[in-house]
Image (tube, grey):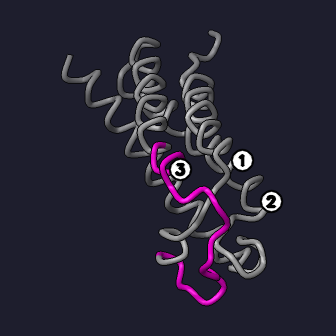
Amino acid sequence: MGRKIGAVVLGYVTMFAGVFILFSTTYLLLGPGRSFQAGSCDVSAAWIIASIVLGFVAALLGGKVCLAVGKTRGTVQALAGLVIVLGLVFAIPVFTGPGEASAVACDGLGGMEAMQEAIQPVWMALLNPVIGAVGVLLGGRKKAA
């Protein structure tokens, strides 16, 4: 039982670290001008596309790690469930937020400040847990012998 819990936790930590590293690198490459819509903190189309791809890659890695440690498909499914639940919990602020375009321009903010001010579309907040769960399940597939 401890191994399975550890596998889920390690899979999630892998996803978290992957998202942090991949998104930080992408922000450095895109810069604020291509990460946000002009004069606001609303994320750009380029950021949304990168977010979908990078979130999926991080989830694939998390699923692979979870399977490698947990050894069972059930452990991977538990991680996918956790990703959905936590993803929906983390989406709550998007629904309860101001719901309008940001009055702050993220162009001059540093990476961490810009991340805190970033405004993503509501549909993206709902899509993220789905992308994560699908990525985990695909990453956690056992290879055919």
Q: In this view, does 53 lie to the left or right of 98?
A: right
Q: Mark 1 points at which residue?
A: 53
Disc marking residue 18? none
Disc marking residue 94? 3
Disc 1 versus disc 3: nearer the observer: 3
Pointer 1: residues within 10 angstroms few (<14), some, or many (20+)?
few
Q: Does dot 3 land on a helix, a strand or a loop?
A: helix
In magenta, the rendered stretch is 92-112
Task: State the CA–CA distance, disc 1 to disc 3.
Answer: 21 Å
Image vertical order of residue 135 relative to residue 111, above or below: above
Q: Does dot 1 land on a helix, a strand or a loop?
A: helix
* Front one among 6 and 55: 55
Look at label 1 and name its amino acid. Answer: Val
* Front one among 117 and 4: 117
Which residue is located at x 48 percent, y 35 percent?
88
Q: Name the residue under label 2.
A: 45
Look at label 2 and name its amino acid. Answer: Ala
